[in-house]
Amino acid sequence: MLVVVKDNFEEVSIEAAKLFASLVRRKPDCVLGFATGSTPLGMYKELIRLHKEEGLDFSKVITFNLDEYVGLPPSHEQSYHHFMWENLFKHINVDPRHVHVPMGMAENIDEFCLWYEEKIEECGGIDLQILGIGANGHIAFNEPGSSLGSRTRIKTLSTQTCEDNARFFENKDEVPTYAITMGVGTIMQAHELLLLASGAAKADAIRATVEGPVMAKYPATIVQLHEFATVVVDTDAASKLEGDYSGF
Ligand code: PGA
């Protein structure tokens, strides 16, 4: 696992965008794994700039997102479909037919999850998957205790996650209690992983992820076992690391 420490969020975002852009240039029909949350936003902004100013071409790229709330239609402002279109897809020349975000309104969720796994495989697997990390060590909606071999499936959101999300909804009853998420095993099958973190609130999770034992209590720790994983963090998120990563 390669650990890269940058001065701030902006530098983390630019480094991450460089890795994505270089893959898109090298392999125009690559399969990209995207994530929601505040962490990838800076990278998305930079990818949009590279598209608009330097002609970075996404027309052949295929995308898969990590997760989506169950019960929210794609048009809902808090859906991850909406997030991705607002913050990235509508600003670049991605082909809408190449975009895959789990379908929170699927009639048969188990069938949908199987289909999602098959579709990823049919496209040749995810070339590069971006990951944020929860302060509790979750990746996607794989909360602490998730099976490290898990596949795409429906998960109940933790009470903490529901409480954290409540601020985004007008009415408490609207807060989704379930999500569809790629599993830890699905994520590990991506050819390359890029985990980003910024801010002191992520320092404990980053220490566990980079230097702690691999355990289901911190699903992100599994990344240590991936052959091609890069962790890009700012100095605040890196503040509890004991090792010296300045040489990388
Ligand atoms: P954040 O969320 O990017 O908004 O901090 C990351 C996550 O929970 O995976």
Image: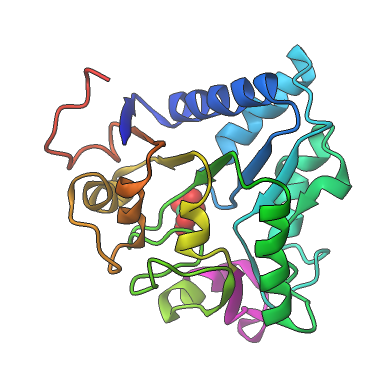
Above or below 95: residue 75: below
- Residue nearer the viewer, 45 or 116: 116
How are the colours assigned in the image? rainbow
Query: Who's the residue at 72% across and 48% down the image?
Result: 123
Query: Who's the residue at 35% across and 25% down the image?
Result: 6
Above or below 230: residue 76: below
Query: Who's the residue at 46% across and 49% down the image?
Result: 132
14 on left or right of 113: left
Is residue 79 something one can see in this rendering? no
Above or below 71: residue 125: above
Q: Residue 173 sits in which quadrant? A: bottom right
Residue 51 position, x and y percent, is 75, 22
Residue 209 position, x and y percent, is 28, 50
Is residue 167 something one can see in this rendering? yes
Q: Residue 178 sits in which quadrant? A: bottom right
Residue 187 position, x and y percent, is 50, 55
Q: Residue 144 sits in which quadrant? A: bottom left
Residue pushed farthest bottom? 173
Report the magenta residues as a range: 164-180
Query: Who's the residue at 45% across and 24% down the image?
Result: 11
| In magenta stretch: residue 140 | no
| In magenta stretch: residue 167 | yes
Report the number of discs.
0
Q: Quadrant of the C terminus?
A: top left
Residue 239 position, x and y percent, is 20, 38
6 on left or right of 215: right
Above or below 228: residue 99: below
Q: Quadrant of the N terminus?
A: top left
